[in-house]
Amino acid sequence: MAQKKSFLLRINPQLYEVLEKWAADEFRSVNAHIEFLLRDAALRSGRLGSKGKTARQETGENDLDQLPPEEQDTNL
């Protein structure tokens, strides 16, 4: 598995509380849930693979591995 990029995220405290509760509902950490939401948005917008695909529930899985070779962008 590829190494993940670490970065600091400043976020509104109220939004963090919403994300914290939402993540708990989905049995994820806040970090994993933010990554899930961002991946899902990137897939839906067509910026990460094909439109209409949904993000994997497990953030440890690489959605790029599921794409046909012509759609894989290893520069992400």
Image (cartoon, rainbow, N blue to C red):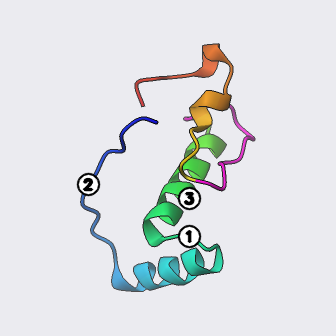
* Mark 1 / mark 2, whichever is N-terminal: 2
Instruction: Report the magenta residues as a range.
Output: 48-58
Mark 3 belongs to which amino acid?
Leu
Give the secondary structure at mark 3: helix
Q: Residue at x 56, y 38 (%)?
A: 62
Q: Nearer the viewer, residue 13 or 28?
A: 28
Q: Is residue 21 above or below residue 64?
A: below
* Mark 3 / mark 2, whichever is N-terminal: 2
Query: Residue tagged by mark 2?
Result: 7
Q: Residue at x 65, y 48 (%)?
A: 55
Mark 2 belongs to which amino acid?
Phe
Determine which of the numbered discs, if any, sits on residue 37 in the image.
3
Q: Residue at x 61, y 74 (%)?
A: 27
Query: Residue tagged by mark 1?
Result: 28
Determine which quarter of the picture holds residue 43: top right
Mark 1, Cα crowd under 10 Å, few <14 / some 14-19 / many 20+, is some
* Mark 3 / mark 1, whichever is N-terminal: 1
Q: Is residue 57 magenta?
A: yes
State left or right for residue 39 relative to residue 66: left
State left or right for residue 37 relative to residue 16: right
C-beta proximity under 8 Å, tags 1 and 2: no
Q: Nearer the viewer, residue 24 or 8?
A: 24
Mark 1 to mark 2: distance in Å?
19 Å
Mark 2, Cα crowd under 10 Å, few <14 / some 14-19 / many 20+, is few
Mark 1 belongs to which amino acid?
Arg
State left or right for residue 8 relative to residue 55: left
Q: Position of residue 33 (x, y in %)?
A: 53, 65
Determine which quarter of the picture holds residue 69: top right
State left or right for residue 14 relative to residue 50: left
Q: Position of residue 63 (x, y in %)?
A: 61, 37
